Image (cartoon, grey):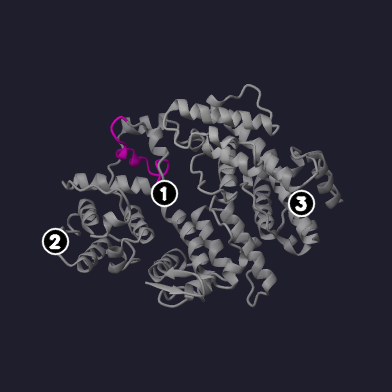
Amino acid sequence: MGESGFTHSYLVEEKLCFAKLANEFLQHEEDLKEIFPLNPESDDLFHSMENGIVLSKLVNIAVENTIDFRALNKQKNMNIYQIKENLNLAINACKGIGIKLPGINPQAFTEKKHHLILAVLWQVMRLCLTKKISLKDCPEIMRLAAEGEELADLLKLAPEAILIRWINYHLKKAGSDRKVTNLGADLKDSVALLYVLNSLEPSKCSLGGLSEEDLVKRADILIKNSEAIGVPPLVRASDITSGNVKILTVFVAEIFNTKHGLEQLNEQEMEAYEKCGIIDDDVEGSRDERAFRFWINSLNIEDVYVNLLFEDFKTGIIPLKVIEKLKPGNIDWKKVDKNPNNTFKRGINCGLIIEAAKKIGLKIPGIGGSDFVDGNKKNVIAVVWQLVRMHYLQIIGSMTEEDLVKWANASVPDLKIKNFKDAALSDGQFLLKLCSAVEPRAINWDIVMKGDTDEEKANNAKYVISIARKLGAVVFCVWEDIANVNYKMILVLVSSLYEIQQQMKA
């Protein structure tokens, strides 16, 4: 069933489900008690999104500390400028955590474009629901490895793929010969999930529903079984029988998050898990990988979404598309193998990356196509960083990096930096003053700290990132990049601020 405006429609069942999810995530937030809980049957969900605060809260549930709430305008009766600032912050934070939002701007929320709001909400809520469905957060997922598969292979799986394996694991454990391949049509008769719940909690979830021939009644039994083990009541029987992939993904993820039923690892297995190097320190290199992955997703290239940078680059196709986006006409697509299903074909594609990189002026001594095929982290990052740098220098036009430093220094008369590696940047003061030079009203100086201690530096750095996004910057850094003066991320941030200032002048 759908409701439509002039040209766009949305599914009512998705609105209902997402409103219930928003209630689950936010109804205990003290500063939202005037609007929560939402009435799922009404348009409360769309009204709640219009000033950016609810979206910001959800973003921080998806990825902790993405938004510094001190940067939000929270007063009652906000004007359109303050609302737009909040929405800019929330939308740019979404982009900063890898969510693709082509064509979505603050007007989508202020004008209540229902289909666009639901499109944003789905991506944010998917992250909220699946953030713990990974081998890194749930070591027991190693139980789902196929024969001959290494743990590193499990790291490559999207949460949906893990959930499909998890369902099949419990189907097999329950003695069923059924196998599912998707989170939509394969689940709409409720059979697979009745078996899963029975495997998880036989005393509370019987298989009696299997004998019910009416699919809606059977789905009702399934929902009651799920609620018996503590799964929140988010879906209706008709949602299950319709086979809606988004709603069924919500339902399955909630079951997994409530009780996954995978046996705890023994000492020997835990040792093997730790030896795999799955748990790594969040060093600058891994932060750069995360930022570059999100940067690529923000380019809105058709059919491109990067989950794992090094893995997704191995076929050569995505980096070639990135180069084409930045410097059109430098790839001979007739030579590109669109189905590189073996190492030889991948090698040809990755060789074309090197050719194109040289053509557009990247410095790649000692780096070859095999580095991409093999996932050589250091060399892949070196090439991608040059593409990022090229992109942001394109944004600032004819200026060089040295010109950008001069602009920044001229904008902040009372402080000076030598370059974007200057340790003086670590306290956040210079960058906050640069944000203020772009838009003086954006900063509340009463909450800015001196930056003498690590804690004060962290507080200022978090504030810098949220203020920059509030002004309209699409940046991918985390606060540690500022506190530790990560030159790459500082360059991206300052380039973005320069671009915003030029747009304001225009």
Q: Amino acid at mark 1?
A: Lys
Q: Position of residue 388 (x, y in %)?
A: 65, 41
187 vs 440, left or right, is: left
Question: Mark 2 or mark 1: which is in front?
Answer: 2
Label 2 crowd (10 A; few <14 / some 14-19 / many >=20):
few
429 vs 255, left or right, is: right
Quadrant location of the N terminus in the rendered image = bottom left
- Highlighted magenta segment, given as a residue range: 133-148
**Residue tagged by mark 2?**
208
Question: Mark 2 or mark 3: which is in front?
Answer: 3
42, above or below 150, in the image:
below
Distance of mark 2 from mark 1, alpha carbons? 31 Å
Q: Earlier in the sequence, mark 2 or mark 1?
A: 1
Pick whichever, 48 or 376, lies toward us.
376
Q: Would you say the residues marked 2 and 3 are in contact, meaning their CB atoms lie under 8 Å apart?
A: no
Residue found at x 37% / y 40%: 139
Q: Position of residue 313 (x, y in %)?
A: 52, 35
Label 3 crowd (10 A; few <14 / some 14-19 / many >=20):
many
156 vs 313, left or right, is: left
38 vs 70, left or right, is: left
Q: Earlier in the sequence, mark 2 or mark 3?
A: 2
Q: Position of residue 392 (x, y in %)?
A: 70, 45
**Residue tagged by mark 1?**
132
- Would residue 330 be counted in the magenta stretch? no
Q: Amino acid at mark 2?
A: Gly
Q: Position of residue 284 (x, y in %)?
A: 60, 37
**Residue tagged by mark 3?**
498
Q: Using the rendered image of the protein, determine whether residue 458 is visible from the camera's viewpoint.
A: yes
Q: Using the rendered image of the protein, determine whether residue 484 is visible from the camera's viewpoint.
A: no
